[in-house]
């Protein structure tokens, strides 16, 4: 009988998003995993139809659960267990254009932080 749900950290490891289950658990504990828009705990269960967002290397990977796996399987079977609806990654030329602070420049001031967030398209202050 097939399982109806599985732990999110175990499922991410089984479908080969993370190399080890402990890495999947660590990412979940640090808040890089969201299930249906909510921050997930490692023991939270996923079921078919759930949307899992994984933040890896600064980019979100959006996966829709199609099949529940609790044991690690081959890559061909793992790819069939989810639908990847992630937006395409930006081209390397675009990533290089993002401004970066010089190493050792210290912590940004409040004004610099707000300017950086405006550049990224995020609004931090509701009064702006």
Image (cartoon, rainbow, N blue to C red):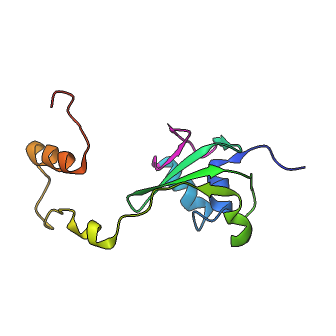
Q: Nearer the viewer, residue 59 or 83?
A: 83
User: Residue pushed farthest right?
Assistant: 1
Q: Left or right: where does residue 65 sit relative to residue 110?
A: right
Q: Residue at x 44, y 61 (%)?
A: 88
Image quarter in which the C terminus is found: top left
Whether 31 is among the magenta residues is yes
Q: Quadrant of residue 75?
A: bottom right
Q: Residue at x 46, y 50 (%)?
A: 32
User: Residue pushed farthest top?
Assistant: 127
Stretch in magenta: 30-43
Q: Quadrant of residue 20?
A: bottom right
* Dominant secondary structure (helix, strand or loop) of the stretch shown in magenta: loop
Q: Left or right: where does residue 46 sit relative to residue 100?
A: right
Q: Left or right: where does residue 79 sit relative to residue 51?
A: right
Q: Residue at x 74, y 44 (%)?
A: 5
Q: Position of residue 120 (x, y in %)?
A: 24, 50
Q: Position of residue 86 (x, y in %)?
A: 50, 56
Q: Nearer the viewer, residue 32 or 124?
A: 124
- Residue 18 vertical placement versus 25 (above, below): below
Whether 4 is among the magenta residues is no
Q: Position of residue 113 (x, y in %)?
A: 16, 47
Q: Residue at x 71, y 71 (%)?
A: 76
Q: Nearer the viewer, residue 47 or 66?
A: 66
Q: Position of residue 95 (x, y in %)?
A: 28, 66
What is the tally of numbered marks visible in this picture? 0
């Amino acid at each position: 009988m097939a399982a109806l749900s599985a732990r999110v950290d175990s499922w991410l490891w089984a479908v080969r998003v993370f190399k080890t289950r402990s890495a999947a658990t660590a990412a979940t504990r640090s808040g890089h995993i969201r299930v249906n828009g909510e921050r997930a705990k490692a023991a939270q269960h996923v079921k078919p139809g759930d949307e899992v967002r994984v933040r890896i290397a600064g980019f979100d990977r959006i996966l829709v659960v199609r099949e529940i796996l609790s044991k690690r399987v081959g890559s061909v079977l793992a790819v069939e267990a989810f639908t990847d609806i992630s937006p395409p990654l930006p081209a390397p030329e675009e990533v290089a254009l993002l401004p970066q602070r010089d190493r050792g420049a210290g912590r940004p001031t409040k004004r610099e932080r707000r300017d950086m967030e405006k550049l990224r398209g995020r609004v931090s202050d509701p009064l702006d």
